[in-house]
Image (tube, rainbow, N blue to C red):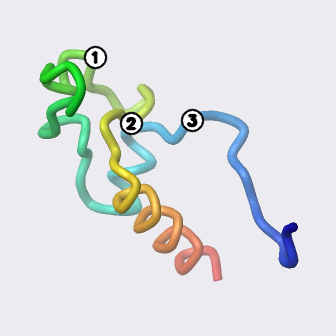
């Protein structure tokens, strides 16, 4: 049960959006834990979805975005 308001994006978070908020693009330097492939092999670009973000990075992004919108 939700007790407060929240916002949700209409699309995936792009690499450009993530980098603008966090200062880095994990797609450029992470490796997929399951396949062992470099995430950058999926493509690098500001308009592409950010890839290989772990739970902690996702929470940090959401928290920082909330701080910026206050």
Q: Which mark is on residue 18?
A: none
Task: Tell me which residue sits at (43%, 56%) in the image.
Answer: 58
Task: Tell me which residue sits at (26%, 46%) in the image.
Answer: 25
Quick check: 44 above or below 6?
above
- Looking at the image, do the residues carrying marks 2 and 3 touch, with CB atoms under 8 Å apart? yes
Q: Which mark is on residue 50?
A: 2
Task: Tell me which residue sits at (84%, 77%) in the image.
Answer: 4
Instruction: Give the image location of residue 38, x and y in percent.
Output: 14, 24
Q: Which residue is mark 3?
A: 12
Q: Give the Cα separation between the discs numbered 2 and 1.
A: 10 Å
Mark 1 surroundings within 10 Å by alpha-carbon count, few (fewer than 14), some (14 through 19), many (20 or more):
some
Q: Which mark is on residue 42?
A: 1
Instruction: Give the image location of residue 63, x and y in percent.
Output: 51, 73
Task: Identify the mark nearer the N-term, 3 or 1.
Answer: 3
Q: Give the Cα separation between the discs numbered 2 and 3.
A: 8 Å
- Looking at the image, do the residues carrying marks 2 and 1 touch, with CB atoms under 8 Å apart? no
Say what secondary structure mark 1 lies in: helix
Instruction: Give the image location of residue 16, x and y in percent.
Output: 39, 42
Say what secondary structure mark 3 lies in: loop
């Amino acid at each position: 049960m939700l007790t407060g308001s929240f916002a949700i994006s209409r699309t995936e978070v792009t690499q450009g959006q993530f980098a603008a908020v966090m200062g880095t693009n994990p797609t450029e330097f992470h490796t997929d834990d399951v396949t062992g492939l470099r995430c950058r092999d999926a493509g690098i670009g500001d308009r592409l979805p950010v890839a290989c973000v772990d739970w902690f990075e996702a929470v940090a992004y959401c928290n920082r975005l909330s701080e910026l919108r206050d």
